């Protein structure tokens, strides 16, 4: 009985997250809980029960959306590489993700979430905390690797991750929107490794 209840709860959670992705991507901060619930064949009460609030649903949506990307990154950047090799592998993986079928809808969601965060500072703070949690995985991915005869510290890795995120967000937007012609895997890798070479 408990197993069935847990399965039902997870089904409802999944249905609401999928519906929220569609509605939030389209409507941003104007997204209505009633439409999200209706698309999921549930009630708004289910949203409050599972996520606590509209903001809770949006934060869960971001975590759900980012999790597989960070898991793929960990697979694309194996242990045993030095820092520049790891950054090269990460950059190439990131560039390939720009060609994925869902890249445009992902970019639309990113822009929508920025707009929502500007309209709701509390949500912005919650989203930032969620993204920082995911970024901690990247810090762990780069910290401890060798570079120029020394080992990369957590502090150095965090500074690098912040810089790489800014670089890749800008480049990937250009690629997806057709504004960065010639920004292929090698371009991403060269730009990222130039950043990493000066990490300190």
Image: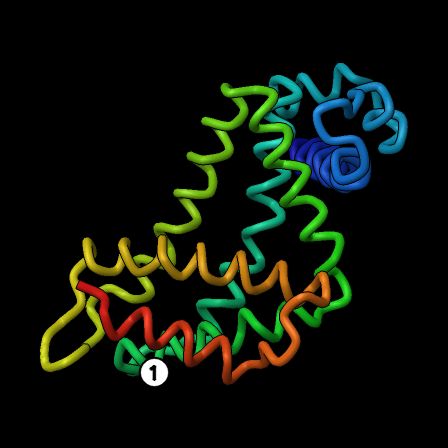
Report whether 188 appears left or right of 45: left
Total number of numbered discs in the rendering:
1
Which residue is pictured at 69% across the width and 52% down the height? 106
Which residue is pictured at 75% across the width and 52% down the height? 105
Q: Quadrant of the C terminus?
A: bottom left
Report whether 9 appears left or right of 44: left
Name the spot of residue 66 as percent of width and height, x first.
56, 51
Name the spot of residue 168 as percent of width and height, x first.
50, 62
Residue 124, can we see it? yes
Residue 8, can we see it? no
Q: In which quarter of the image is residue 85?
A: bottom left
- Of helix, strand and loop, which one carries label 1? helix
Which residue is pictured at 44% across the width and 56% down the height? 165
- Residue bearing mark 1: 85
**Outermost residue, left direction?**
149
Q: Residue 32 versus residue 164: which sits nearer the camera?
A: 164
Q: In which quarter of the image is residue 143?
A: bottom left
Q: In this view, does 83 lie above or below 166?
A: below
Q: Residue 53 versus residue 118: which sits nearer the camera?
A: 118
Name the spot of residue 177 as percent of width and height, x first.
72, 61
Name the spot of residue 155 as percent of width and height, x first.
19, 53
Q: How is the image coloured?
A: rainbow
Q: Residue 85 versus residue 114: which sits nearer the camera?
A: 114
Q: Quadrant of the N terminus?
A: top right
Which residue is pictured at 71% across the width and 22% down the height? 47
Q: Is residue 85 above or below residue 179?
A: below
Neighbour tally class for label 1: few under 14, some 14-19, many 20 plus, Cα within 10 Å: some
């Amino acid at each position: 009985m408990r197993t069935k209840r847990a399965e039902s709860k997870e089904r409802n959670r999944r249905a609401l997250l999928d519906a929220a992705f569609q509605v939030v991507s389209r409507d941003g901060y104007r997204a209505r809980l009633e439409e999200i619930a209706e698309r999921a064949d549930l009630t708004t009460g289910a949203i409050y029960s599972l996520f606590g609030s509209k903001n809770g649903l949006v934060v869960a949506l971001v975590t759900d959306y980012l999790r597989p990307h960070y898991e793929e990154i960990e697979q694309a950047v194996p242990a045993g590489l030095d820092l520049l090799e790891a950054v090269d592998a990460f950059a190439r993986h990131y560039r390939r993700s720009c060609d994925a079928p869902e890249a445009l809808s992902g970019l639309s969601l990113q822009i929508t979430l920025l707009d929502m965060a500007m309209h709701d500072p509390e949500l912005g703070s919650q989203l930032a905390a969620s993204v920082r949690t995911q970024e901690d995985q990247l810090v762990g991915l780069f910290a401890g690797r060798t570079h120029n005869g020394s080992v990369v510290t957590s502090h150095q890795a965090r500074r690098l991750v912040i810089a790489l995120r800014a670089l890749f967000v800008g480049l990937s937007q250009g690629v997806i929107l057709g504004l960065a012609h010639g920004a292929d895997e090698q371009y991403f890798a060269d730009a990222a490794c130039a950043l990493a070479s000066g990490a300190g």
